[in-house]
Each structure stands twice: as C-alpha cells, then as structure tokens.
Amino acid sequence: MTQSGGYQVDPSELTTFATYLSGTTHGEIVDAANGVHSANGFDNNAFGIFAAQLLAVPARIAMGVANDNLNKLASEISDAADLTNTTADNYRQNEQNNAGSFQAIDGSSQT
C-alpha cells in the first residue's frame, strides 16, 4: 500500500472498483442501450395518422441519439476500468521496485 502526503492507495481497492465497472456498470449500460435500440422499432401508427407525422420521426431520432450516447458511455466505462486496472498494476510494480531498492541498500531478503 502506497502512502505519501496524507493519502493512501491500495491497489486491490482499485482492482475491485475496476472489476465493478467492467462487470456490472458496463453491462447495465449496454443492456439499457439495447433496450433503447429495441424500443426504437415501434410502430409509427401508434401515434395515429396525423400525430405520426409530427411525433414518430423526432421520437426515433431522439431514441437513436440516446442509443448512441449509451453506447459511447459503455465504451468510456470500459476504458475507465482498463485505466484503473493499469493504475493498480503500476502501484503494485512501484511498491515492488521500492522494496527491491531497500533490499539492495540493507542486503535483506524480501518476504
């Protein structure tokens, strides 16, 4: 665990958070995007003859935009999970490197 200047970083907590992002949050956003995509195939006649011309096309456009935004969000969540895992790995490696430096100074073995 890295501690400096009043803060601590526990790489296992970062890994846990990244797992939550990729395993739960990402999947739920993808499910929402799929639901919006499925709902976007609604029947234009549901609005009636006159209202369909006014409401159906804008509704489909709005749902398409919502679907695209949800897919982009899912991608960003996936990227955030990857970056969080990378950060955790970097902290672990830094700790190992620092421990090795101290071993070299005092000649002790790492446990």
Image (cartoon, rainbow, N blue to C red):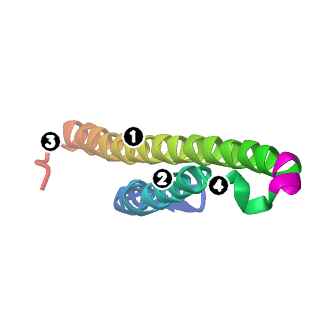
Disc 3 marks a residue whose amino acid type is: Gly
Marks 2 and 1, how far apart in space?
23 Å
Residue drawn at the location 37% of the way across and 62% of the way down: 16
For label 2, the SS is helix
The x and y percentages for residue 93 are: 30, 40
Q: In this view, does 73 lie to the left or right of 13?
A: right
In the foreground, 97 or 12: 12
Q: Which of marks 2 and 3 is in front?
A: 2
Question: Who comes first in sequence, dot 2 or dot 1?
Answer: 2
| Residue 46 as seen in the image, left or right of residue 27 | right
Range drawn in magenta: 49-53
Q: In the rendered image, which residue does mark 3 sit on?
A: 107
Using the numbered discs, state the Cα–Cα distance from disc 2 to disc 3 in whole angstroms: 53 Å
Q: How crowded is mark 4: few (under 14 residues within 10 Å), some or many (20 or more)?
A: few
In the rendered structure, which amino acid carries the disc numbered 1?
A: Thr
Q: CA–CA distance between discs 1 and 4? A: 46 Å
Residue 86, disc: 1
Residue located at (48% from left, 40% from top): 79
Q: Residues within 10 Å of mark 1 (few under 14, many from 20)?
A: some
- Residues at circles 2 and 3 in contact by the CB criterion of under 8 Å: no
Q: Name the residue under label 4.
A: 43
Q: Pointer 3 and pointer 1: residues touching (CB < 8 Å)? A: no
Is 92 or 67 nearer to us in this picture? Answer: 67
Q: Is residue 15 magenta?
A: no
**Alpha carbons under labels 4 and 2: distance apart:** 24 Å
Q: Which of the two labelled residues, at mark 1 and mark 4, occupies the earlier sequence position?
A: 4
Quadrant assignment, res 94:
top left
- Residue farthest front in this picture: 49
For marks 2 and 3 on the same chain, the one whose residue lies earlier in the sequence = 2
| Residue located beneath label 2 in the image | 30
Q: Which of marks 2 and 1 is in front?
A: 2
- Which numbered disc, 1 or 4, marks the residue closer to the eye? 4
